Image (cartoon, grey):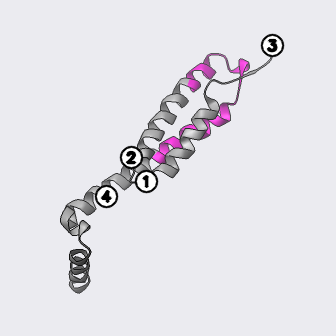
Amino acid sequence: MEKQNLPNSTLTLVMGILSIVGCCCYGAPGLIFAIIAIILGTKATNIYKEAPENYDGYGNVKAGKIMGYIGLILSILFVVFIIWIITYFGWETLQNEDLMREKLMELQQQQ
């Protein structure tokens, strides 16, 4: 019997890559892509474990899941950083260039 490709193996890999790239876009796209990569990778892993001799492409699934976990962690860290910036400086300060400059000068003088 000829080996067939594991369902969604390539899609898992693509979603894993997009999760790492998407974490740079304020974290939200990275979170979405990472969750999709992890879910699809887990389903494909379960299918592969039932009959590993019938399927090919498990390397893509493993790589996609690993990148999904990395993208998830990076996206969470970026979202936490953005929330910290907003709470530390305030929304009005971030929208006003002069206020932001003043806040940064105050920070430099404190150090």
Nearer the N terminus, badge 4 or badge 2? Answer: 2
Rendered residue at 19%/65% (across/down): 92
Quadrant showing the N terminus: top right
- Number of residues whose C-alpha sits closer than 10 Å to that of mark 1, classed few (under 14), some (14–19) or many (20 or more): few
Q: CA distance from mark 3 to mark 1?
A: 45 Å
Q: Amino acid at mark 4?
A: Ile
Frontmost of labels 3 and 4 is 4
Q: Secondary structure at mark 1?
A: loop
50 in magenta: yes
Depth check: give the residue in front, 25 or 82. Answer: 25
Q: Pointer 3: what residue?
A: 1
Q: Secondary structure at mark 2?
A: helix
Q: CA distance from mark 4 to mark 2?
A: 11 Å
Q: Quadrant of residue 109?
A: bottom left
Q: Amino acid at mark 3?
A: Met
Q: Pointer 2: what residue?
A: 28
Nearer the N terminus, badge 3 or badge 4? Answer: 3
79 in magenta: no
